[in-house]
Image (cartoon, rainbow, N blue to C red):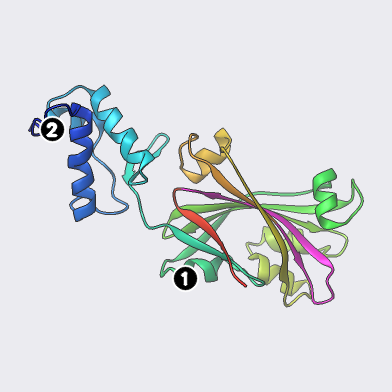
Amino acid sequence: MTVPAEDGVAVWKRIETALRQEIETGALAAGSRMPTEAQLATRFSVNRHTIRRAIEALSRAGLVRVEQGRGSFVAEELLDYAVGPRTRFSEWIRRHSKEPSGQNVDLRLVGADAATASGLGVAVGSDVVILERLGFADGRPVSLSLHCFPAGRFPLLHEYFRTGMGISEALAACGLPDYRRQSSRVTARLPTTREAALLRMPKSQPLLVAENINVDAQGRVVEFGIGRYPTPRVQIVFEP
């Protein structure tokens, strides 16, 4: 198959247009894997460099996402992460009619560095529980979050996390039935190699990074967190 000739229009651009039409009409379904460069090169009777330029253009337009080591996929819907006083991961994902799940990727009991100590309002070197968790929506990674808690206030929290308890459940077991978001600060940066691999996103696309402080009913800090969200899949919305 070849693409129709158009005066003054590069071949890669005509291929991009053809693939864009297939995405917009649903012939290439949202979330589906794109054909490989080799398959597309054969289909359109061009070299792989030409196909690569077309895919890069679709990626820049937000229609295709390229995952390191996995190939290219048709972009899915953008999830609104609504930041409110009681933001909970599972509620956020279910609001989009998707199934939430999670995976602990790191759990440590360590001395607080300066940034963590400042966020929690504790002394540098104080024992803190560090939980890093990868969050999924229908099996697709949408968040990589670092949660920091004062171990002195929650001495059993580390063990509860080791049994597989979620954050709200573990804090409730420690005697804290509820907590709320006090503040969030959002920035953006490119992901590290590790972050890109865990979130299955290209290193060339930015992360949204939200530093959050959660407090109890008396206003005491119970958690300092850093959430990282892939911009191809998530946008942050602040709710009143």
**Where residue 145 appears, x then y in whole percent?**
62, 53
Q: Residue at x 84, y 47 (%)?
A: 112
Considering depth in this image, is 142 or 181 the residue closer to the camera? 181
| Label drawn at residue 94 | 1
Q: Tell whether position 163 is magenta.
A: no
Q: Quadrant of residue 43?
A: top left
Q: Residue at x 29, y 28 (%)?
A: 52
CA distance for labels 1 and 2 = 39 Å
Q: Which mark is first along the chain, 2 or 1?
A: 2
- Which residue is nearer to you in this view: 69 or 97? 97
- Extreme-front residue of the structure: 8
**Residue 216 on the magenta span:** yes
Instruction: Name the one closer to the observer, 164 or 5.
Output: 5
Residue 157 % position (x, y): 76, 63
User: What residue type is disc 2 on?
Assistant: Arg
Q: Residue 113, can we see it?
A: no
Residue appearing at x 90%, y 46% in the figure: 124
Please state the horizontal and vertical placement of residue 221, each as a whole percent of the image.
82, 64
Q: Quadrant of the C terminus?
A: bottom right
Q: Residues within 10 Å of mark 2 (few under 14, many from 20)?
A: few
Identify which residue is drawn at 88% across, 60% down: 152
Q: Position of residue 110 (x, y in %)?
A: 81, 47
Q: Which mark is residue 190?
A: none
Residue matched to label 2: 43
Magenta extent: 212-231
Do residues under tags 1 and 2 come within 8 Å of each other at their CB atoms?
A: no
